[in-house]
Image (spheres, rainbow, N blue to C red):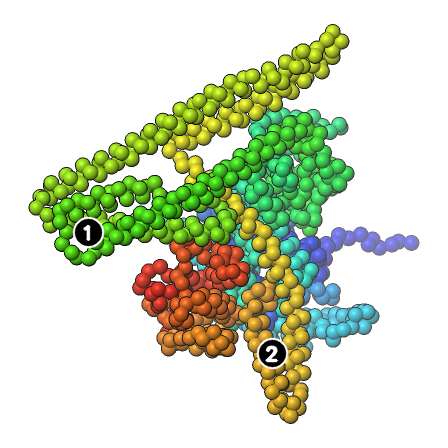
């Protein structure tokens, strides 16, 4: 029997869903998808890229850049072609598309990264422009490719070309209409292809419905993919505000001194997926909800160091950001920074770490470079990182490494306590050992949940020996495509493909971590034990010196006030009498004038001996009051002396002496007084130096005998049976301890002398340092308490709001007879007051979106009177608000502005209670809002710290109100300060606060 041959050659056929698999199916998560698209911008030689997210009924986003862009033909032939050759060939772009930037190694490989947009949103509008070309746009609804009955060629992507970016909203509408033709909603019976497409959608919808009916979860009504496509087209309108930020990026390259014309690409993501949708507006989801925290943390952790922060090149820098925007009446109302390019742990931060490993692992598998342990440098270090069985030249190739960490226990760290606290906070945000290829991040390495080098696995076995920890390690591995080309990424960008090279690379790094820890950082390191012993001794000495100096300074300060205060008071009384005599206008004889001159000169000499001493940190309130009284008396003495000198100069000018004679006389007297002062201090210095010299000679003699005192008894006890090695070791211990003690003692003195020789005021420097240390310690303790308060309020606020609503509902439900009862009226009044207090606390609440509104001075005035009227009446305080202020209008968040006025007036009501006249006034002077009160003026020592957190002079104050007021205002670029200039003051001898509102108008 003869059979007809069935032999033939066929081609693969691609269904539409192939695109769906290559896009959403190949990407692990939203941050990875964004990373892929940012890499495309990098490949296009963009200087800037951003992900901007927009709130609205339908949430949208945009990935925008100012790269080289594409022509209409390139968009069609390259971007809409999967697996383009340009990526696989890794060729440089033409010179005109590189904009004089340094050459960049192409990051993309397969030409499918652009499909990542399907993971982020179901619809993508791509808009692009190349230099010397028009804008081009294409609209893709990726859900079209989910239809299992359609072939790839059945789906058409609508495109258009236009001249002006502002035409885009209209272009979008036209493209949307064309895109709907892919559904063949009203097929032409004369066109079989349309009938086929219509049938494909009907069959696909039927399959979807069948799957829905079989599913366990039927909480929501069935909506087919076709309906979703139609509904989005019906409901979504392109807002031209989406273009604002892209226009800014394009304008950055438009100048003649840059590229001369706009160019770039924007991917508008329409109907964002849930992860990105929550970044625009959490809706009912609490800020502390685990889902929201996890999404934001993953997004930021993945993309924070997108470009290698340890090796940034200003000439070839690539800036990135993630930002969300809210709209009000189609106008951008508020924005929030989610990720900024500068928010990284950079090379400067890295260089300050006490433990560092910097160098290369060469192609032989040896580490070569520098290691710093406890701040001590070991240069030209070399040791093998290779394992048995590795080839002579590694398959991985040479690569760079930078590893750094710090001691978590402050007592074991060469860092100061403040530095350890700072680094601990930095580690919470930035820790992780990242991998970069040609300066761009390789995912997922360095993320909190990735332990590719098994650092924590080893640390769990022995934390002492295995010193490195993933949450406390900073650094990178630096790879290069041409050298490390066998380390290849998985298709879904979930790390390197597991093969022999990846395993070798991992072993090299693990061995580097092990060897460096064993030799320099971990518990097995001999150097570590020596350094820790020395650090402990140094810190103990430093603490002792600090305590001793603090005690001496406090004692000197107290004694100075105690001894000098009576003398100062006497001099103040004398100068008052002299001042009165000169001010009285009585004609004075020459003898009287000479007597006054002599007395003023004597007081001036004594004034120098009575100067205000440096105030130590943390003095008691009684001593603080004594200090301020002394300071004010000294200031009065100085001012009266200057006034008296002015009067005497006037009298001198009226005398019979010529100008030259008067000036010569003044010169001679002043010169003589200056010489007296210098001679007195020179004598004191000589005496002090002689005493210091005698003291150190005596000390040196005693120190020379210290070794004899400790070592001779050991020599005296030696017999023929003594253990020679033990004796020698004991003598070495005595020598080493004494050598360290003597070196520290004498070097500390020499360093102090060196500073004195250079004219450094050691006393003032120590006082300032101690004050800053004390202040920082105080603020940290209080910040913890404030954070706990904020968290507690956030948790309780939801319950309070629910209870408040329940009480309101219950009160309103009572019958009319009950509502007329005095008890009901009092309860309702108290309840309303309680609600106002809750509104006042609203800025402390972290979660929930707050919109910007027009706020008037009249509204603020009503709010103030509603909040304080009863209290003001009880305390007999007058609150006057001018009509000028009531005309004031700003646009902002009410819960940001109202509490500022409440805080300042609440403080004012306390301080005016100390005055006979009790007035609070609010007005507008030269476009500045002034809130003034008749209470005492703020002390000059307190003005600088007035807006610091926890700084207060009120006995019942907490020092939070003014700080929060300033911080809340600064968010919206408003300013607040305490008035010092007379022209800014509303009440001349009272306390005046100034607020400068950005964009304020008077209507």
**Quadrant showing the C terminus:** bottom left
Q: Quadrant of residue 355?
A: top right
Pointer 2: what residue? 831
- The kind of secondary structure element at disc 2 is helix
Q: Nearer the viewer, residue 943 or 707?
A: 707
- In this rendering, the answer to whether 606 lies above or below 46 is above
Looking at the image, residue 146 sits to the left or right of residue 651; the answer is right
Q: Nearer the viewer, residue 700 or 392?
A: 700
Residue 809 in picture, x, y percent from top left: 66, 82
Q: Nearer the viewer, residue 649 or 861?
A: 649
- In this rendering, the answer to whether 903 lies above or below 700 is below
Pointer 1: what residue? 647
Name the residue rendered at 54%, 26% in the picture: 744
Alpha carbon of mark 2 to alpha carbon of mark 1: how far? Answer: 66 Å
- The kind of secondary structure element at disc 1 is helix
Residue 261 in picture, x, y percent from top left: 42, 55
Name the residue rendered at 53%, 19% in the picture: 702
Q: Nearer the viewer, residue 935 or 54?
A: 935
Looking at the image, residue 538 sits to the left or right of residue 814; the answer is left
Name the residue rendered at 54%, 20% in the picture: 703
Residue 787 in picture, x, y percent from top left: 60, 57
Residue 181 in picture, x, y percent from top left: 62, 72
Q: Residue furthest bottom?
A: 817
Q: In the rendered image, is residue 969 in sight? A: yes
Tell whether label 1 touches label 2 (CB within 8 Å): no
Residue 894: which numbered mark, if any? none
Looking at the image, residue 822 sits to the left or right of residue 331; the answer is right
């Amino acid at each position: 029997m003869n059979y007809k041959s069935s032999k033939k050659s066929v081609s693969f056929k691609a269904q539409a869903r192939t695109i769906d698999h290559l896009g959403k199916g190949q990407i692990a998560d939203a941050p990875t998808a964004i990373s892929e698209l940012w890499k495309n911008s990098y490949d296009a030689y963009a200087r800037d890229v951003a992900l901007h997210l927009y709130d609205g009924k339908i949430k949208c986003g945009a990935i925008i850049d100012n790269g080289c862009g594409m022509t209409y033909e390139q968009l069609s032939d390259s971007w809409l072609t999967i697996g383009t050759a340009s990526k696989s060939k890794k060729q440089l772009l033409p010179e005109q598309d590189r904009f004089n930037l340094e050459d960049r190694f192409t990051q993309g490989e397969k030409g499918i990264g652009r499909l990542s947009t399907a993971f982020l949103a179901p619809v993508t509008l791509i808009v692009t422009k190349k230099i010397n070309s028009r804008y081009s746009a294409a609209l893709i609804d990726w859900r079209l490719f989910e239809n299992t009955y359609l072939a790839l060629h059945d789906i058409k992507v609508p495109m258009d070309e236009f001249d002006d970016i502002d035409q885009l909203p209209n272009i979008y509408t036209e493209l949307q209409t064309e895109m709907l033709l892919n559904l063949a909603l009203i097929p032409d019976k004369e066109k079989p292809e349309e009938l086929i497409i219509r049938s494909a959608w009907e069959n696909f919808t039927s399959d979807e419905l069948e799957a829905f009916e079989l599913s366990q979860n039927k909480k929501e009504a069935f909506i087919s993919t076709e309906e979703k496509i139609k509904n989005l087209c019906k409901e979504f309108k392109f807002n031209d505000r989406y273009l604002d930020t892209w226009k800014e990026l394009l304008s950055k390259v438009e100048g003649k001194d840059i590229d001369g014309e706009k160019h770039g690409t924007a991917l508008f993501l329409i109907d964002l997926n849930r992860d990105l949708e929550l970044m625009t507006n959490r809706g009912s989801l609490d800020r502390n909800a685990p889902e929201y925290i996890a999404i934001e943390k993953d997004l930021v952790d993945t993309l924070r160091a997108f470009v290698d922060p340890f090796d940034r090149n200003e000439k070839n820098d690539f800036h990135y950001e993630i930002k969300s925007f809210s709209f009000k009446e189609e106008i951008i109302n508020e924005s929030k920074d989610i990720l900024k390019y500068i928010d990284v742990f950079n090379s400067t931060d890295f260089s300050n770490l006490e433990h560092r490993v910097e160098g290369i692992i060469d192609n032989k598998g040896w580490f070569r470079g520098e290691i710093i342990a406890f701040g001590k440098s070991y240069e030209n270090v070399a040791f093998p990182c290779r394992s048995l069985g590795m080839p002579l030249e590694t398959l991985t190739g040479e690569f760079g490494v930078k590893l750094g960490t710090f001691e978590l226990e402050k007592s074991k760290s060469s860092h100061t306590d403040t530095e350890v606290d700072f680094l601990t906070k930095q580690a919470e945000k930035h820790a992780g050992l990242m991998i970069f290829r040609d300066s761009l991040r390789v995912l997922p390495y360095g993320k909190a949940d990735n332990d590719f080098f098994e650092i924590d696995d080893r640390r769990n076995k022995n934390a002492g020996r295995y010193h490195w920890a993933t949450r406390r390690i900073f650094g990178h591995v630096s790879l290069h495509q041409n050298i490390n080309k066998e380390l290849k990424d998985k298709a879904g960008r979930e790390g390197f493909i597991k093969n022999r090279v990846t395993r070798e690379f991992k072993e090299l790094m693990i061995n580097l971590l092990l060897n460096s820890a064993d030799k320099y950082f971990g518990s097995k390191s001999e150097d570590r034990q020596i350094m820790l012993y020395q650090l402990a001794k140094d810190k103990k000495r430093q603490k002792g010196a600090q305590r001793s100096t603090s005690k001496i300074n406090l004692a000197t300060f107290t004694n100075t006030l105690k001894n000098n205060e009576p003398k100062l008071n006497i001099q103040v009384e004398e100068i008052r009498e002299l001042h009165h005599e000169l001010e009285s206008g009585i004609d004075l004889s020459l003898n009287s004038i000479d007597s006054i001159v002599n007395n003023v000169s004597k007081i001036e000499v004594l004034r120098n001996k009575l100067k205000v001493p440096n105030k130590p940190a943390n003095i008691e309130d009684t001593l603080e009051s004594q200090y301020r009284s002394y300071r004010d008396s000294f200031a009065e003495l100085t001012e009266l002396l200057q006034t008296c000198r002015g009067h005497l100069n006037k009298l001198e000018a009226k005398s019979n002496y010529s100008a030259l004679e008067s000036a010569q006389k003044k010169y001679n007297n002043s010169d003589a007084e200056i010489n007296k002062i210098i001679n007195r201090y020179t004598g004191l210095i000589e005496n002090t130096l002689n005493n210091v010299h005698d003291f150190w000679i005596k000390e040196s003699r005693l120190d020379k005998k210290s070794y004899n005192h400790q070592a001779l008894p050991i020599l005296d006890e030696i017999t023929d049976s003594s253990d020679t090695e033990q004796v020698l070791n004991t003598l070495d211990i005595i020598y080493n301890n004494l050598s360290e003690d003597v070196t520290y003692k004498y070097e500390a003195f020499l360093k102090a002398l060196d500073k004195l020789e250079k004219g450094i005021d050691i006393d003032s420097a120590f006082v300032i340092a101690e004050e800053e240390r004390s202040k920082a310690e105080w603020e940290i303790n209080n910040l913890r308490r404030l954070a706990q308060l904020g968290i507690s309020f956030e948790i309780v606020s939801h319950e309070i709001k629910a209870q408040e609503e329940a009480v309101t509902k219950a009160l309103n439900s009572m019958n009319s007879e009950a509502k007329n009862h005095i008890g009901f009226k009092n309860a309702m009044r108290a309840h309303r007051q309680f609600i106002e207090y809750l509104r006042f606390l609203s800025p402390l609440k972290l979660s929930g979106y707050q919109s910007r509104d027009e706020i008037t001075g009249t509204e603020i005035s009503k709010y103030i009177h509603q909040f304080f009227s009863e209290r003001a009446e009880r305390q007999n305080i007058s609150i006057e608000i001018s009509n000028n202020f009531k005309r004031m209008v700003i646009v902002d968040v009410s819960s940001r502005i109202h509490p500022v006025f409440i805080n300042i007036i609440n403080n004012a009501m306390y301080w005016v209670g100390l005055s006979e006249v009790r007035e609070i006034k609010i007005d507008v002077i030269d476009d500045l809002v002034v809130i003034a009160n008749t209470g005492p003026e703020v002390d000059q020592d307190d003005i600088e710290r007035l807006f610091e957190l926890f700084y207060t002079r009120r006995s019942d104050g907490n020092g939070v109100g003014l700080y929060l007021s300033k911080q809340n205002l600064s968010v919206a670029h408003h300013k607040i300060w305490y008035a010092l200039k007379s022209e800014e003051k509303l009440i001349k001898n009272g306390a005046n606060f100034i607020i400068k509102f950005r964009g304020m108008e008077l209507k």
